[in-house]
Amino acid sequence: MLPVLTIEYCPKCQWLLRAAWMAQEFLITFDGLIGAVTLRPSETGGRFTIFLNDEIVFDRKENGGFAEIKELKQMLRDVIAPEKDLGHSDKKQ
């Protein structure tokens, strides 16, 4: 069974578009490696958290702000498919 990503975002902060854009990026980058990306409005103000299945991969408050999409892709890749090359978005060796 393929993993499922959930992006929980604060609708009061107007973060739906950011969450939708990230979902699109993850679906393109991890085509065939993830089963779905869901967007979930949070009841907690200021929340922006990305879950892989039920595990937190990224939390905006814990990380002191938003991470770049490049960093998020690397975090997800390291868990989902460590051997996957992210091309120009990959870490410098």
Image (cartoon, helix red, strand yellow):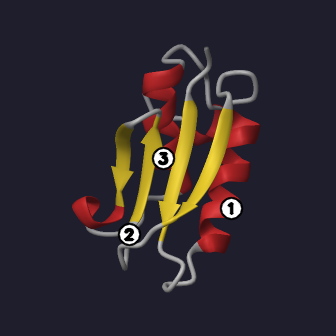
Q: Identify the residue under disc 3.
A: 72
Q: Earlier in the sequence, mark 3 or mark 1?
A: 1
Residue at (37%, 79%) from the top-left corner?
45
- Rendering coords of residue 22 (x, y %): 63, 56
Q: Residues within 10 Å of mark 3 (few under 14, many from 20)?
A: some
Disc marking residue 66: none
Q: Identify the residue under disc 1.
A: 20
Q: Residues within 10 Å of mark 1 (few under 14, many from 20)?
A: some
Disc marking residue 47: 2
- Rendering coords of residue 78 (x, y %): 44, 26
| Residue 91 visible | no
- Rendering coords of residue 71 (x, y %): 46, 47
Residue type, mark 1 in image: Ala
Residue at (67%, 72%) from the top-left corner?
17
Please tell me whether residue 63 is drawn above or below residue 91 in the rendered image. below
Residue 44 appears left or right of 50: left
Residue 55 appears left or right of 34: left
Residue 85 appears left or right of 62: right
Residue type, mark 2 in image: Arg
Q: Nearer the viewer, residue 34 or 74?
A: 34
Give how far apart the Cα atoms at labels 3 and 1 are.
14 Å
Q: Quadrant of residue 34?
A: top right
Q: Earlier in the sequence, mark 2 or mark 3?
A: 2
Residue 51 appears left or right of 59: right
Give how far apart the Cα atoms at labels 2 and 3 are.
16 Å
Q: In which quadrant of the rendered image does the C terminus lie?
A: top left
Residue at (48%, 34%) from the top-left corner?
76
In the image, farthest residue toward the front = 43
